[in-house]
Image (cartoon, rainbow, N blue to C red):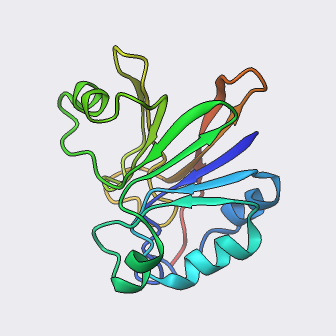
């Protein structure tokens, strides 16, 4: 099972549209995961129309339209792994321990908010992934997103952070 992970798209405030490279990944993704701060409902509509399955949450910059359609916390079993999606996890300091206590029933937690890519594992085995932002790099050198694979035997493999080319203009 192929996963496409993104967060903090902030459309149309941070960019006019999703990057072409990211959109090109949609046909090969079995599940698209978005960890909030969509800002516009058009992005949700686009992903739902062009994806097999979308698992998403709302973020702190998402208004009533998105909050009516998306949960604050999403959970999904994907290929035998228990995934959770949230927008914000708080400070990076002791994040693994804090998230492991908050989500003891998960195997993987996808989060956003910081725009800073993250890939770590808590002592309990909980894998934490933040794909960064494909449209707003903030102080990061690149805009980013992630892909991953869930194998037939329920393992998360091929977790890859993709760097997008810098936009001109």
Vertical side of 80 occupied by 64: above or below: below
In the drawing, does residue 56 fall left or right of residue 98? Answer: right
Which residue is the extreme one toward the right?
27
Spot occupied by residue 163 in the image (x, y as percentages of width and height): 57, 48
Foreground residue among 14 and 90: 90
Vertical side of 54 occupied by 79: above or below: above
Taking the spot 35% from the left edge, 28% from the top edge, the residue there is 104
Q: Indicate the quadrant where residue 103 lies.
A: top left
Taking the spot 49% from the left edge, 78% from the top edge, the residue there is 15
Spot occupied by residue 138 in the image (x, y as percentages of width and height): 33, 60
Badge count: 0
Specify whether residue 17 is in view: no
Specify whether residue 155 is in view: yes
Taking the spot 62% from the left edge, 36% from the top edge, the residue there is 160
Spot occupied by residue 100 in the image (x, y as percentages of width and height): 31, 27
Foreground residue among 93 and 165: 93
Q: Indicate the quadrant where residue 77 lies.
A: top right
Foreground residue among 61 and 118: 61
In the drawing, does residue 39 fall left or right of residue 41? Answer: left
Which residue is the extreme one toward the top?
123
In the drawing, does residue 37 fall left or right of residue 75? Answer: left
In the drawing, does residue 141 fall left or right of residue 148? Answer: left
Where does the N terminus fall, quadrant-wise? top right
Vertical side of 149 occupied by 63: above or below: below
Taking the spot 40% from the left edge, 48% from the top edge, the residue there is 111
Spot occupied by residue 89 in the image (x, y as percentages of width and height): 27, 45
């Amino acid at each position: 099972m192929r996963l496409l992970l993104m967060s903090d798209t902030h459309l149309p405030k941070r960019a006019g549209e999703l990057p072409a490279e990211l959109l090109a990944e949609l046909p090969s993704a079995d599940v698209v995961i978005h960890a909030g701060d969509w800002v516009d409902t058009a992005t949700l509509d686009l992903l739902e129309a062009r994806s097999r399955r979308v698992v998403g949450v709302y973020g702190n910059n998402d208004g009533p339209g998105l909050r009516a359609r998306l949960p604050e916390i999403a959970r999904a079993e994907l290929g035998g792994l228990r995934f959770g999606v949230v927008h914000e996890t708080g400070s990076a300091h002791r994040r693994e321990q804090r998230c492991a206590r908050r989500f003891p029933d998960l195997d993987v937690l996808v989060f956003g908010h910081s725009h800073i890519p993250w890939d770590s594992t808590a002592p309990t085995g909980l894998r934490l992934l933040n794909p960064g932002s494909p449209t707003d790099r903030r102080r990061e050198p690149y805009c980013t997103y992630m892909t991953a694979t869930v194998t037939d035997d329920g393992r998360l493999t091929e977790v890859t952070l993709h760097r997008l080319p810098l936009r001109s203009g």
